[in-house]
Amino acid sequence: MAPPSRPIPLDESDDSPPARILRAAREQLFAAGYNALTMDALAHELGMSKKTLYAHFDSKDAMIAAIIDGIEQRLRGRLDAILGDRSLGFTRKLHGVIATISTQYASHNPLLLRDLQRFAPPLYRKIDELRNRLTPSVIGRLLQTGIAEGMVRKDVDAEFAVQFFLQAMTGLVHPKRLEALRLTPAQAFEKAIGFFFSAVLTEAGRRDLDKARPRRAGA
């Protein structure tokens, strides 16, 4: 059977076989990496036969592709809720975006991207494509909000800035680059977005961002 044509919800309330399979597969994938996720281990954990697994997903890679689709669906929903909330100003939206994406990155095994690049290039490209779809919308909307509120400089070329950030992130989260920098994907993202916005903020924007930045205990 071909993989599902649309993302399958991974929330705990969905007890359908495909959703149960994907939840268990996601946990194994993020905890132990690509090679550790096997149909045998998954069938044993779920108390299912491998035949049942293959009735819903025709391969391990098809299963992971569905997980990536589900991640994109969930991220879009959360980011749209933050960016579309009129009660939030630019700074709170920026912190919300950082927290949401960093949390997603932090749930991954640090070696997952490297394993996918090495053993499943189509899945690695699928993650690249997800980033290429989400980044322009998220960064573009943040810039628009920031300019409208006087937090981002009006002379910023938003289209160029979006592409600049996208290309920077694509290079930074490359597995070899992360290893060289000794950073996790979450750390690379937080550093990149902090560096990026520090260059485009107005003085008012910098003051507001500094006030909203979490303080360390004892500081």
Image (spheres, helix red, strand yellow):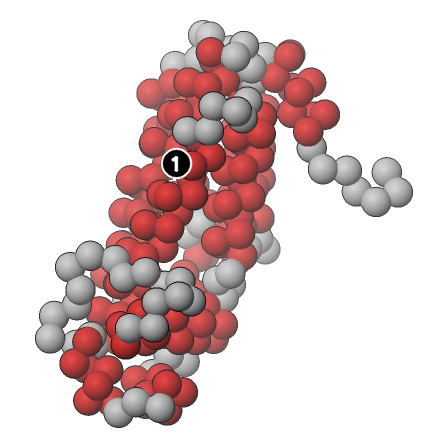
The outermost residue toward the left is 1
Q: Quadrant of residue 131?
A: top left
Q: Going by the image, does 48 lie left or right of 158?
A: left
How many numbered discs, if any?
1
State the image coordinates of residue 200 (x, y, percent, origin top left): 53, 18
The outermost residue toward the top is 155
State the image coordinates of residue 25 (x, y, percent, origin top left): 37, 74
Foreground of the two, 192 or 55: 55
Which image quarter is the N terminus in? bottom left
Res. 139 visible in picture:
no
Say which residue appears at 27% left-offset and 61% top-offset.
8
> Vertically, is 22 above or below 107?
below
Foreground of the two, 171 or 44: 44
Q: Amino acid at mark 1?
A: Asp
Q: Going by the image, does 145 lie left or right of 211?
A: left
Foreground of the two, 137 or 22: 22
> Vertically, is 179 above or below 130?
below
Say which residue appears at 22% left-offset and 69% top-offset.
62
Foreground of the two, 63 or 82: 82
State the image coordinates of residue 96 (x, y, percent, origin top left): 54, 37
Say which residue appears at 61% left-offset and 17% top-offset.
205
State the image coordinates of residue 90 (x, y, percent, origin top left): 53, 23
Which image quarter is the C terminus in? top right
Q: Quadrant of residue 37?
A: bottom left
Q: Which residue is under mark 1?
A: 80
Q: Quadrant of residue 116?
A: bottom left
Say which residue appears at 48% left-offset and 62% top-offset.
108
> Vertically, is 54 above or below 105?
below
Res. 196 visible in picture:
yes
Circle 1 packing at 10 Å, graded few (<14), some (14-19), many (20+), is: some
